[in-house]
């Protein structure tokens, strides 16, 4: 079954009236068909990150060929990076900074000693936790002394691994939250958390969330979730639901709320294929790439695309079992660009972290070929005065927009024949009809949007106040 067939299978038939979508003035991405009722001649298309420069060479004595688990965030006008240095049994969390997300420096912090010297950027030692996942806690109730938090693999309880919590006022100086673990590996599962278990404050659902390693029957690695109102008491684990898709080993998850639309959750799991080996003399079996999926509640995930989001590519040193892992965090690095960071050359002396880019909002799009096509949204309500779209066409391509009532009747002043034809490549373009762009009179009324397209992609839309 092709990706476009999977998309068609998941769309509503049009015979059943779908639920009305209340989107207010928030940005909506076309990473799924949540907003779409019907498609004709168009399909959802996944876009792939473009490799850019090397962000960090893991060439310091406290790093090495299995450095891993990057977390990147943008704070104000600078960027911050936490990552694992060292090996499986001798690892630590280190820290780097950047003013542009491109050029990175390791500050000399002088906190921990390594090989007789404190001239390093180590912030958490392995005697505290392993595989730490750092996040900034923007919970309004959080005190400044705990503004940054982290989870990591702690001292086992019997045979079962634990996840423990750390807090920090600045992301540099850390202390254990408490001696008791946050969570213990459940008795009905394998006893390990041996991966990067991702934690964050969910500002939409007002809870802390951890996406952790789990094991399905037959030893298949997968992802489970636990939540907490206070970062102390945690719910029972529940498996994420990826729908009716083939079961694969998902070794990491890299979950993040999208920075421009935090009600949409993104994952870039590292897919692991233990039965494949590319290099005959490889010390460990298996191959890896990264896939893409999205969610609107953190529990039910849309994984319609089984194809790789990030392939190993032509570099032979990426064709082994722990490569192409995308770290936690999607950050803006330009007016029309966002960046992710991923691991290359793992287990090789040249192990490194590389940056890759996509256009802003550009994970997926509704895409039309030269022959053209169209799609219609479900009934929606909005607040705002203008409709703005993120789109791209060829020189011969176009996008036109019609606004209809909930019964699919075109509205006067917003008919397709009155739509100003759009062509170009813009992150924010105001949609217009003849001599106006105002949609203020339609706010809070159920309407549908009809997009007629040729050789074009639409990545996102938003209703917003007029800027002029």
Image (cartoon, rainbow, N blue to C red):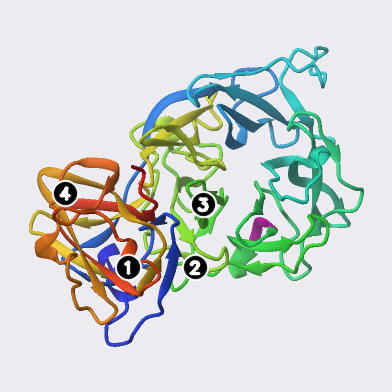
Picture coordinates of residue 54, whole percent (x, y): 46, 23
Relative vertical location of residue 299 with respect to residue 456 in this rendering, above or below: below
Closer to the chain start, of discs 2 and 4, is 2
Closer to the chain start, of discs 1 and 4, is 4
Q: Which mark is residue 407?
A: none
Relative vertical location of residue 420 with respect to residue 59 in this rendering, above or below: below
Closer to the chain start, of discs 3 and 1, is 3
Picture coordinates of residue 190, whole percent (x, y): 72, 62
Of circles 4 and 3, which is in front? 4
- Magenta stretch encompasses residue 220: no
What residue occupies the far right of the structure in this picture? 179
Which residue range is magenta in the image? 208-214
Closer to the chain start, of discs 2 and 1, is 2
Q: Residue at x 75, y 31 (%)?
A: 170
**How far apart are the alpha carbons under marks 1 and 4?**
22 Å
**How far apart are the alpha carbons under marks 2 and 3?**
12 Å
**How far apart are the alpha carbons under marks 3 and 1?**
40 Å
Circle 4 residue: 422
**How far apart are the alpha carbons under marks 2 and 1?**
36 Å
Of circles 1 and 4, which is in front? 1
Quadrant location of the C terminus?
Answer: top left
* Majority secondary structure of magenta residues: strand
Closer to the chain start, of discs 4 and 3, is 3
Q: Residue at x 16, y 49 (%)?
A: 422
Circle 3 residue: 269
Q: Residue at x 41, y 41 (%)?
A: 278
Circle 2 residue: 242
Of circles 2 and 4, which is in front? 4
Of circles 3 and 1, which is in front? 1
Is 170 on the left or on the right of 346, as rendered?
right
């Amino acid at each position: 079954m092709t990706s476009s067939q999977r998309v068609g299978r998941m769309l509503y038939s049009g015979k059943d009236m779908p639920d009305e979508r209340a989107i207010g003035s928030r940005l909506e991405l076309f990473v799924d068909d949540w907003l779409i009722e019907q498609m004709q001649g168009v399909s959802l298309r996944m876009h792939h990150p473009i490799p850019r420069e090397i962000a960090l060479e893991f060439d310091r004595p406290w790093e090495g060929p299995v450095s891993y688990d990057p977390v990147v965030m943008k704070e104000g006008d600078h960027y911050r990076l936490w990552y694992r240095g060292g090996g499986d049994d001798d690892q630590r969390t280190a820290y780097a900074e950047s003013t542009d997300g491109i050029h990175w420096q390791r500050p000399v912090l002088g906190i921990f000693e390594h090989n007789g010297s404190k001239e390093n950027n180590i912030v958490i030692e392995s005697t505290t936790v392993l595989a730490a996942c750092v996040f900034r806690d923007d919970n309004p109730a959080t005190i400044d002394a705990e503004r940054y938090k982290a989870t990591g693999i702690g001292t086992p309880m019997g045979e079962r691994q634990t996840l423990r919590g750390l807090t920090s006022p600045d992301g540099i100086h850390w202390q254990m939250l408490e001696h008791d673990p946050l969570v213990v590996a459940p008795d009905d599962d394998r006893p390990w958390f041996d991966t990067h278990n991702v934690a964050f404050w969910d500002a939409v659902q007002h809870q802390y969330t951890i996406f952790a390693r789990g094991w399905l029957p037959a030893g298949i690695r997968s992802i489970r979730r636990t939540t907490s109102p206070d970062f102390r008491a945690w719910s029972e684990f529940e498996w994420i639901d990826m729908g009716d898709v083939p079961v694969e080993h998902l070794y990491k998850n890299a979950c993040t709320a999208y920075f421009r639309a935090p009600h949409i959750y993104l994952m870039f799991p590292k897919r692991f294929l233990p039965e494949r080996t590319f290099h005959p003399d490889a010390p460990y079996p298996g191959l890896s790439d990264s896939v893409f999926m999205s969610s609107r509640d953190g529990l039910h995930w849309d994984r319609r695309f089984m194809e790789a989001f990030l392939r190993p590519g032509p570099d032979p040193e990426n064709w082994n079992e722990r490569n192409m892992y995308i770290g936690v965090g999607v950050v803006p690095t330009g007016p029309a660009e966002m960046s992710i960071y991923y691991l290359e050359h793992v287990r090789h002396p040249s192990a490194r972290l590389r940056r890759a880019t996509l256009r802003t909002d550009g994970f997926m799009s509704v895409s039309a070929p030269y022959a053209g096509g169209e799609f219609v949204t479900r009934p929606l309500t909005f607040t705002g005065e203008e409709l703005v779209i993120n789109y791209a066409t060829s020189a011969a391509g176009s996008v036109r927009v019609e606004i209809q009532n909930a019964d699919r009747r075109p509205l006067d002043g917003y008919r397709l024949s009155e739509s100003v034809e759009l062509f170009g490549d813009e992150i924010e373009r105001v949609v217009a009809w003849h001599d106006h762009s105002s949609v203020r009179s339609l706010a809070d009324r159920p309407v549908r949007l009809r997009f007629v397209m040729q050789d074009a992609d639409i990545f996102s839309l938003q209703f917003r106040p007029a800027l002029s």
